[in-house]
Image (tube, rainbow, N blue to C red):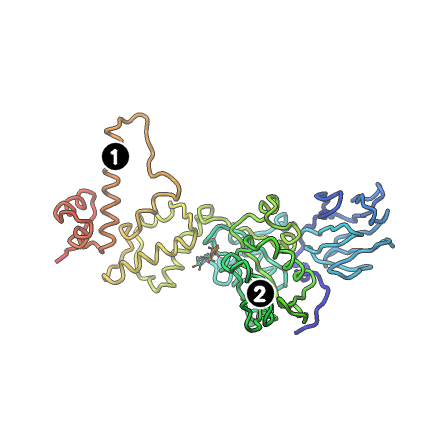
Amino acid sequence: MKSPDTRAFGGPSPFAVEVVVTVLSGASKGATLPLKGKVRVGKAPDNDLVLTDDTVSRHHCELSRTVAGVLVRDLESTNGIVVSGARVQEGIFPPGTILRVGEVEIGLRPAPQRMDVLPSASQSFGGAIGHSVAMRTIFTILERIAKTDATVLLEGETGTGKDVLARAICKESPRANKPFMVVDCGAVSYSLIESELFGHERGAFTGAVSARQGAFELADGGTVFLDEIGELPLDVQPKLLRVLETREFRRVGGNKTFAADVRVIAATKRNLEREVAAGKFREDLYFRLAVVPITIPPLRLRRDDITPLITHILNSASASDLVLPKESLESLLAHDWPGNVRELRNVLERAIYMVKPTGGTELSAITFPLSMSVPEGGSPFQFEPSKSYRETRAKYDADFERRYVKWLLGRHHGNVSAAAREARMDRKHLHDMAKKHGLRGESDG
Ligand SMILES: Nc1ncnc2c1ncn2[C@@H]1O[C@H](COP(=O)(O)OP(=O)(O)OP(=O)(O)O)[C@@H](O)[C@H]1O
């Protein structure tokens, strides 16, 4: 293992991001200032950033933006500047670094969303497909930062592709051939999460019958993917923060210090900034993780991606020969996809499994589940005040009948007898209903 160093976690500046200086503790907590030109920090009122704290000197330090990062210079202060536990006279630090000025913590917060980012010319990044402007803009950022050690925070609803992007970042990084260790912070039991991350020594706790390596140790030289980071218990959060700051860790119950030579990628379904505001997630840890914050929009807000994703999913299921009629494509494009790309994949794969064994060549709308046309949590009904109860009811009865028959026949690949048997209804009646709605059942010999 490499010897531990005091380099701020996140590595060199990944790209020319704007930096905002944020006060994280003390009386001026919450104060922010964009880092433009030189920023003087100290207790005296003529500073750009005034910190009213007795541990801060009148003119304490000076910060300025350089191409390589933020130049931090101590102005002969009494209590100095500390970064990752080491006192600093002068040095260049990447966005994401936290400085201790006397006893006050100030963060150099990156603001990459204010960068002028053009969408990538590429319609994929690693295994992730995306033709929409939103996804291609994300690809541009990832193309730039994948090769660095910058910590990435991926936020997005379930199924939007956080896991795919984390793996893609790893694949495009110099750590591609090193381990990629996943810790699902939401799935590991509370008592074991620390051991899962950092390992434990034999006898460290009841049940620790033998020593065990954690993800940070196993990933040495590679990448640790902290999935569902928003679920990390509050009392474990400072431990992770310390490791990210000092880049070293110990196993639970151990004395030996290991260097954490890993790149960290974290992901969450939650809005972590909101969790911070609600006191459920530590601000300093959020700050450490969100060096490159990426928000993946839900699929319903980037419908341009649906068609290429369908093609991609059909290809990867060796079903590119199946035809998707216009009507079916339209219904897929219109759906709101609360489960995002995962739901699209599931719907298509189910349809493929239903059609392929029958030797069918079309993924007709009949093979898509009924639930598709009803947004999750939404109502399938849209009432019109001009229509009477009878008319309204007749319309929905007919709609219900059509959807039900479509679904039922779909389950039985159009075999009317089998479908009627399952629904315990008369075969002829089902046949007539299908005919009425223009749904054809297969000859059921
Ligand atoms: N842009 C994409 N290109 C290709 N496949 C994708 C894309 N986004 C998601 N997928 C596919 O959708 C499924 C769900 O993606 P993934 O597991 O990455 O989502 P997630 O955001 O990590 O979900 P969760 O929050 O539930 O863990 C996977 O099968 C993945 O391959």
Q: Nearer the viewer, residue 90 or 235?
A: 235
Q: Nearer the viewer, residue 414 or 83?
A: 83
Quadrant location, the N terminus: bottom right
Quadrant of the rendered structure where residue 318 is? bottom left
Quadrant location, the C terminus: bottom left
Instruction: Please tell me which residue is depicted at 47% across the width and 53% down the height of the picture.
Output: 160
- What crowding class fits label 1: few (fewer than 14 Cα within 10 Å), some (14-19), or many (20 or more)? few
**Observer able to see residue 230:** yes
The numbered disc on residue 25 is none
Q: Position of residue 410 (x, y in %)?
A: 25, 52
Quadrant of the rendered structure where residue 206 is? bottom right
Label 1 – label 2 distance at C-alpha: 59 Å
The numbered disc on residue 195 is 2
Q: Nearer the viewer, mark 1 or mark 2?
A: 2
Along the horizontal axis of the image, is 347 left or right of 208?
Answer: left
Instruction: Please tell me which residue is depicted at 27% across the width and 58% down the height of the picture.
Output: 354
Dot 2 falls on a residue whose secondary structure is: helix
Q: Nearer the viewer, residue 233 or 324?
A: 233
When the figure is inspected, residue 389 is found, relative to residue 409, above or below; the finding is above
Along the polypeptide, which appears first: circle 1 or circle 2? 2
Along the horizontal axis of the image, is 376 left or right of 92?
Answer: left
Q: Position of residue 132 (x, y in %)?
A: 48, 51
Q: Position of residue 20 (x, y in %)?
A: 70, 48
Instruction: Please tell me which residue is depicted at 57% across the width and 68% down the height of the picture.
Output: 214
Residue placed under numbered mark 1 in the picture: 395
Dot 1 falls on a residue whose secondary structure is: helix
- Determine contact: label 1, label 2, CB under 8 Å: no
Instruction: Please tell me which residue is depicted at 23% across the width and 42% down the height of the picture.
Output: 401
